[in-house]
């Protein structure tokens, strides 16, 4: 594991993002499922078992029979030990089919309910209806997101309601939501931001289920919450790049060299295909520089290197192919959550100032505000890919509304595998998390929006 604690202060921005990701992704398996089950395996808390489970090079020994099986798209699975023997520049050849597909894009992804754009609106202070649950009442709360517990003094971030400009949201109704989920599997698939939304959903829903009728099965990749009396599950699948990659183990993965199979979604789709309602996201993992592609039919481990946006587009296309081929909109509901904004640079909303989201207690009121963390070319690409899926996918376009919420991040008020040490607490310019979101908070509203579409 990277010794991030030893790094000197004043990280470059990218290192800070990395640092947060490393810590959070590693901590995933520790995700503080308090109360119910705590039988996690060997020492995940400090990550000191890292590497022990990896047999160097073993994944590269495949049998000829597997290799010849053309119906099987992924002859060698990628894991932490996968290496590129050499790397060439991505030549775009394989994107031809993607270009072809785009031509048929006539449909528009569904993003409105009854003609009202729910994602255009403003935040209204409302300490009567909010928060929808109390931090300390939620047994599934993650220590990474429990900001009050970790010392955040201002609680204003609990009390904001999202008010669309031209209509009202249906009021959140826990039992109503359970009725929609009865007999179904709801699954969140993606990275740590999506995991935050899943935890928010558990916190919103759990109070309606008697303690002896709820259970959670921790698993390194797939975590399942069960509500017996509704015969329903609310699950989270770790798949930060959607396609198969060397980051698929939420605990044990490499960040300095991201290798993925842009044409292989099977590793994850085999786990998500049985869900009835699927909520996907992917974004921030593509923002750490270039990625390496290892196509399924590449036998000599020659990788192609492509920038993050290009890699994300290939992954989104593979995902969209799966949706197109497997989703009957009458039977399965698919949602895609757009990029979650970051607030790493205070100068962007307060020109001339220094610092980050630390100390922020109010949302941004400039209606047009859009930070540099939300990449517009990525948004255009996502739009293009989703539009060819038409009514098979609904967009949860949370980017603009979350842009306003510079006050919603954990900053220094969170725990990694241990509470932040005092000297780090005293140095918020280097140790603030301005990427994830405190709970109760912004992801609750993402879930309220999801509720509108079910
Ligand atoms: C080829 O792969 C398919 C799909 O995974 C599998 O059903 C089949 O048994 C495999 N055939 C051989 C010869 O391994
Ligand atoms: C809500 O906020 C108002 C204004 O800040 C305050 O006067 C009031 O006491 C608060 N009510 C509750 C229930 O916290
Ligand atoms: C949260 O706790 C406060 C004080 O204990 C209580 O008045 C309030 O009803 C609780 N809210 C919810 C949503 O449970
Ligand atoms: C529970 O839901 C599953 C689908 O998720 C269904 O196959 C099963 O029949 C249901 N069981 C009961 C008792 O309703
Ligand atoms: C945060 O706010 C407090 C109180 O307003 C102030 O004393 C402190 O200097 C601020 N810190 C930063 C880093 O802006
Ligand atoms: C999301 O909303 C923004 C405006 O806030 C818009 O520019 C963008 O195209 C939308 N994205 C999608 C995928 O619909």
Image: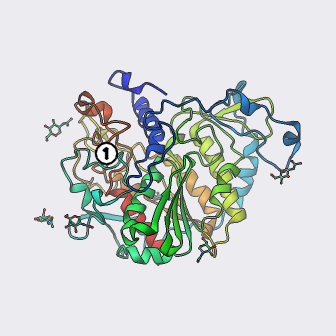
Question: Front-most of 441 and 364?
Answer: 441
* Residue at figure coordinates x 34%, y 59% from the top left: 138
Residue 421 lies in quadrant: top left
Residue 319 in sight from this viewpoint: yes
Q: How is the image coloured?
A: rainbow
Q: Secondary structure at mark 1?
A: loop
> Label 1: which residue?
410
Quadrant position of ligand 2: bottom left
**Residue 51 coordinates in the image, percent (x, y):** 57, 29
Mark 1 sits near ligand 5, with its Cβ under 8 Å away: no
Residue 449 lies in quadrant: bottom left
- Residue 328, relative to residue 92: is it above or below? below
Residue 77 lies in quadrant: top right
**Residue 408 coordinates in the image, percent (x, y):** 30, 51
* Residue at figure coordinates x 51%, y 48% from the top left: 191
**Residue 294 coordinates in the image, percent (x, y):** 71, 36
- Residue 364, relative to residue 328: is it above or below? above
Residue 454 in sight from this viewpoint: no
- Residue 244, relative to residue 405: is it above or below? above
* Residue at figure coordinates x 33%, y 25% from the top left: 10
Q: Residues within 10 Å of mark 1 (few under 14, many from 20)?
A: many
Question: Front-most of 289 and 236?
Answer: 236
Is residue 45 left or right of 70 when viewed as pictured? left
Is residue 157 left or right of 13 when viewed as pictured? left
Is residue 445 left or right of 305 when viewed as pictured? left
* Residue at figure coordinates x 68%, y 56% from the top left: 270
**Residue 182 coordinates in the image, percent (x, y):** 52, 76
Question: Front-most of 261 and 421?
Answer: 421
- Residue 392, relative to residue 21: is it above or below? below
């Amino acid at each position: 594991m990277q010794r991030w604690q030893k790094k000197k202060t004043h990280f470059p921005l990218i290192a800070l993002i990395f640092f947060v990701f490393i810590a959070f992704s590693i901590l995933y398996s520790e995700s503080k499922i308090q109360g119910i089950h705590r039988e996690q395996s060997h020492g995940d808390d400090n990550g000191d078992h890292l590497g022990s489970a990896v047999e160097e090079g073993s994944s590269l020994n495949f049998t000829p029979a597997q290799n010849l099986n053309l119906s099987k798209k992924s002859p060698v699975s990628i894991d932490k030990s996968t290496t590129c023997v050499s790397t060439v520049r991505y030549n775009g050849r394989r994107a031809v089919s993607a270009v072809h597909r785009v031509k048929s894009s006539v449909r528009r992804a569904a993003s409105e309910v009854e003609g009202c754009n729910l994602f255009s609106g403003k935040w209204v202070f409302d300490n009567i209806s909010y928060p929808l649950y109390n931090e300390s009442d939620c047994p599934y709360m993650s220590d990474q997101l429990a900001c009050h517990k970790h010392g955040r003094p201002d609680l204003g971030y609990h009390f904001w309601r999202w008010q669309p400009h031209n209509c009202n949201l249906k009021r959140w109704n826990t039992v109503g939501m359970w009725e929609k989920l009865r007999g179904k599997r709801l699954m969140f698939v993606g990275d740590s931001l999506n995991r935050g939304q899943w935890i928010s959903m558990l916190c919103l829903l759990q109070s309606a289920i008697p303690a002896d009728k709820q259970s959670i099965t921790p698993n390194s990749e797939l975590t399942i919450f069960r509500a017996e009396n509704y015969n329903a599950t609310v699950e989270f699948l770790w798949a930060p790049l959607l396609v198969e990659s060397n980051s698929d183990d939420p605990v044990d993965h490499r960040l300095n060299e991201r290798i993925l199979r842009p044409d292989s979604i099977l590793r994850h789709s085999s786990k998500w295909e049985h869900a009835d309602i699927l909520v996907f996201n992917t974004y921030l993992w593509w923002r750490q520089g270039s990625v390496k592609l290892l196509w399924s039919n590449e036998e000599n481990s020659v990788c192609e290197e492509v920038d993050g946006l290009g890699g994300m587009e290939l992954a989104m296309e593979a995902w969209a192919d799966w949706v197109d081929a497997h989703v009957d909109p009458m039977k399965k509901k698919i949602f895609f959550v757009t990029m979650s904004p970051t607030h790493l640079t205070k100068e962007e909303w307060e020109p001339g100032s220094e610092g980050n989201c630390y100390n922020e207690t109010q949302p941004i009121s400039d209606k047009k505000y859009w930070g540099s963390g939300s990449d517009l070319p990525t948004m255009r690409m996502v739009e293009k890919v989703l539009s060819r899926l038409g009514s098979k996918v609904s967009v949860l376009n949370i980017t603009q509304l979350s842009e306003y919420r510079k006050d919603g991040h954990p900053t220094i008020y969170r725990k990694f595998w241990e509470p932040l040490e005092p000297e780090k607490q005293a140095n918020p310019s280097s140790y603030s998390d301005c990427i994830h979101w405190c709970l109760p908070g912004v992801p609750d509203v993402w879930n309220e929006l999801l509720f509108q579409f079910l």
